[in-house]
Image: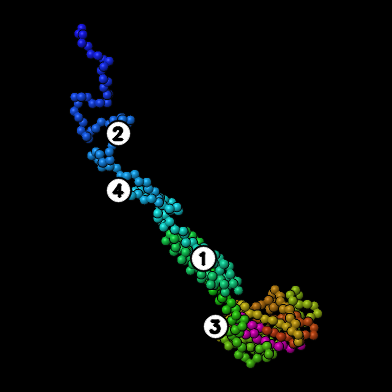
Amino acid sequence: MSDEQPDRSRTERRDPWAPPQDAVPASPQHVPRQPQDQAAPPEPGAGPYPPPPPAVPYGPHQPYEGPYEPYPAPYPPGYGGYPYAAWLHPAPRNALGTAALVLGIVGTVAAITLFGVIVGLPLGVLALVFGIIGRHRARRGEATNGGQALSGAILGAAAIAVSIAVIALVATSYSSWFGGPDVALVSTGGTYDAPLAADGTAKFDDGTQVTVTTPQRFTPPAGADGYSAGDTAYRFTVTVRNTGDGDLHLGDYTYFGTAGTDQTDLQLISTSSGELAQDFPDVLRPGQVSKVVFAFDVPPGLTPLQFDFEPTTNHEDAYWELRLR
């Protein structure tokens, strides 16, 4: 054993992180990482890479000023995160469709009455116009009540049609009530102020002729309707001739029988069979003649007998004053 032994107590402790003495020096690009507690912060601009951008805080009210494009700032409230959300989904334009439905209902109900026509016709026109416009908006996606708009347009058209029908009916009735008959008397007698006598003939300008015979007393058969015991029964014949060129529609003829100076209404005597059961035909062709027997129950002391006959609703009334014996 040699006397020269190393003194281990004097041996310097080696840094475990130091590179070996015979190792090749590392290049600047591959500098080994040192422990965090011993590593020194690098100098700004040191190394082969460019320095990082400065840390500048930014937000909605402080834009980023660094070299890179920042993320956009949050959108204001109400957009739902999308800048064009309000433009893509506008509020539906349902006003005209709703108005058309309401106006159509009111106009149709008002049009069925005489005084409501004045309101029903203009409301129907507005409902039809608003309904068509509302329907077009629904087709373009601007409204969501296309069904209401269509219903309003239909009701508006109905209100217009009903209003026109009521106006036409009123105009026709006014012409009949106040405009006078279409077929006038052309005979010298037969008016209320100048009645015809027995066997007199009322002539109309369309060729219709009506003749009434002299009343005769008679005894009604048993079971006759309209006769009262103690009264006097009179009967006479009414003859209608069609000397014109067109058909004469007698289905809606009218008559009245009165007696005395106060024109007391008389009761018609009728039976289920025989001459008192006969009636005029509905249509009297040109050249045809029809005769019907009329009988009235006349209370005692009433004379003369007034008879009013109207061949159709378009003919003027013809009057007779018949003496009773």
- Stretch in magenta: 309-325
Say whether residue 79 is left or right of residue 105: left
Q: Earlier in the sequence, mark 4 or mark 3?
A: 4
Q: Amino acid at mark 2?
A: Ala
Q: Residues within 10 Å of mark 3 (few under 14, many from 20)?
A: few
Is residue 58 inside the magenta stretch?
no
Residue labelled with disc 3: 246
- Disc 2 to disc 4, C-alpha distance: 27 Å
Point out the residue furthest to the bottom here.
188
Q: Which mark is residue 179?
A: none
Q: Quadrant of residue 12?
A: top left
- Secondary structure beneath dot 4 equals loop
Say whether residue 17 is left or right of residue 261: left
Residue labelled with disc 4: 67
Q: Position of residue 159 (x, y in %)?
A: 54, 69
- Disc 1 to disc 4, C-alpha distance: 61 Å
Q: Earlier in the sequence, mark 2 or mark 3?
A: 2
- Secondary structure beneath dot 1 equals helix
Q: Position of residue 132 (x, y in %)?
A: 46, 66
Which residue is drawn at the image coordinates 65% and 78% (left, top)? 279
Q: Quadrant of residue 105?
A: bottom right
